[in-house]
Amino acid sequence: TVADLKGMKQGQLRLSAITTAKYVIPRLLGPFCQRYPGVEVSLNVMNHEGLLDRLNQNLDDLYILSNPPESKDISCQPFLENPLVVLAPTNHPLAKEKNIPIERLNGEPFIMREPGSGTRSAVQELFDQKEVDVRVRLDLGSNEAIKQAIAGGFGISVLSRHTLALEGSMKRLTILDVQHFPIRRYWHVIYPAGKQLSVVAQTFFDYLLNEGRKVAQETADFKITD
Ligand code: PGA
């Protein structure tokens, strides 16, 4: 019966997630832990590079990241859309324009995530490909700090759209409608192939891929299309 199953789901769940997933994963943990009160969760939040380190050391049950390593030794499931958008202060001169050519970003004061960040690699890849040269004024290791810096007039940036979750009435930031954006990315749930997941980890994995998406939609300020 369901009650028996509930009783079985006890123990530790160790998760690592990239910084942008922290806007969603804690929200998903709420309903999960209510259903299985015997489960104790540890969630490590770090950038892409840090997460790969933990994976290599086999420290956690499940890892949530955008850019899964290309390896046969990984089991990998796409989980949720993670679009990257151009964020600017609401009073930015381009704020009202539509379909802005990406070259217009040349020379724009820009706030970049720190080296080792997956967001940063994705942004740099697109800018390199399109030969766009923004003026990086600041390197910042935190999505929240970058949002504050944008609001403070330091420049524009490219961040996961999920970083706007729960932003509500704080309307100091806007998304610029720049060509080639959003950069389409996905979060994936991965774990070492062949590793036997604990009952708890397997249950959370299934929960993420089924109900997790619905809960995530409630937090996101945009329509998740997958
Ligand atoms: P980051 O990862 O926190 O390393 O920028 C986010 C991502 O790759 O989507």
Image: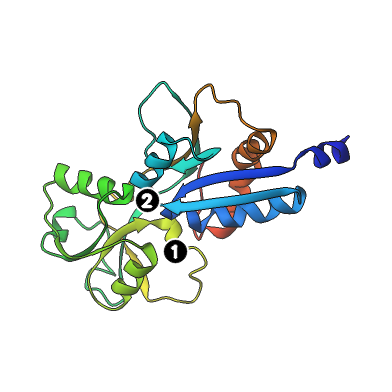
Q: Residue at x 57, y 44 (%)?
A: 14
The spot of residue 98 in percent (x, y) is 27, 61
Q: Which residue is mark 2?
A: 47
The correct choice, above or below, for 166 with respect to 169 in the image is: above
- For disc 2, does the CB lie below 8 Å from ligand 1? yes
Residue 36 in the figure: left or right of residue 157: right
The spot of residue 32 in percent (x, y) is 69, 49
Residue 204 shows up from this direction: yes
Residue 77 shows up from this direction: no
Quadrant location of the N terminus in the rendered image: top right
Q: Residue at x 26, y 46 (%)?
A: 121
- Dot 1 falls on a residue whose secondary structure is helix
The correct choice, above or below, for 173 with respect to 219 in the image is: below
Q: Residue at x 32, y 61 (%)?
A: 141
Marks 2 and 1, how far apart at CA: 18 Å
Q: Are marks 2 and 1 in contact (CB under 8 Å)?
A: no
Residue 41 in the figure: left or right of residue 166: right
The spot of residue 124 in percent (x, y) is 21, 48
Question: Label 1 amino acid?
Answer: Leu
- Dot 2 falls on a residue whose secondary structure is loop
* Precedes in sequence: disc 2 or disc 1: 2
Picture disc at residue 164: 1
Residue 57 in the figure: left or right of residue 14: left
The correct choice, above or below, for 62 with respect to 112 in the image is: above
Q: Residue at x 49, y 63 (%)?
A: 165
